[in-house]
Amino acid sequence: MGIPKKCGGTDPEKLKATLQRNIDIGFHPKGCNTIKSLVDHEFGHALDDLYGFSDMDEVIDRYKTLCKQGQDKAKEALSVYAMKNKKEFIAEAWSEYLNNPNPRPIAKDIGRMMEQKIKEFKKK
């Protein structure tokens, strides 16, 4: 995961300001203004690659619903970046689930579903 210099990749304060600005405009989820949240986002991709969350019908349905609502509603529900594709939807929801003290319903639902599927997989 590389962070471009213009986003503050070499300056922690500039990076934090960029992250906060992205949250303020709804591009990224609430509570995701830390380096930890970036790592959690990327880990969400790794979990998706391992467990195939983005191919699950319940995720596809939630993603399509978010996209149909448009950017303004996506900002309120999760983030604009989550509309990019199903994989970003998963990673954005996972990051908010882990980093927002009060995750919004989509992040909470997706995060809990991911945890449940991982637990089920471990039982096998």
Image: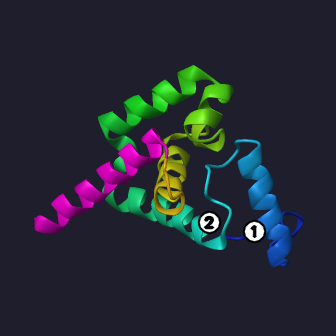
* Residue that extends furthest to the right in the rendered view of this protein: 6
* Residue that extends furthest to the left in the rendered view of this protein: 124
Vertical side of 58 occupied by 109: above or below: below
Between marks 2 and 1 in the image, the one whose residue lies nearer the viewer: 2
Asked whether, in this view, residue 55 is left or right of residue 95, the answer is left
CB atoms of marks 2 and 1 within 8 Å:
yes
Instruction: Give the amino acid type for the residue marked by disc 2 in the picture.
Output: Leu
Report which quarter residue 42 is drawn in: bottom right
Vertical side of 112 occupied by 64: above or below: above
Quarter of the image where the N terminus is located: bottom right
The answer to whether residue 95 is magenta is: no
The first of marks 2 and 1 along the sequence is 1
Image position, residue 97 (x, y; %): 46, 55
Q: Main secondary structure of the magenta part?
A: helix
Q: Residue at x 45, y 64 (%)?
A: 46
Image position, residue 113 (x, y; %): 30, 49
Report which quarter residue 71 is drawn in: top right
Mark 1: secondary structure = loop
Mark 2: secondary structure = helix
Residue at the spot of label 1: 3
Whether residue 63 is visible: yes
Q: Residue at x 76, y 42 (%)?
A: 25
Residue at the spot of label 2: 38
Image position, residue 19 (x, y; %): 75, 59
Q: Which residues are magenta?
A: 104-124
Q: Residue at x 61, y 49 (%)?
A: 29
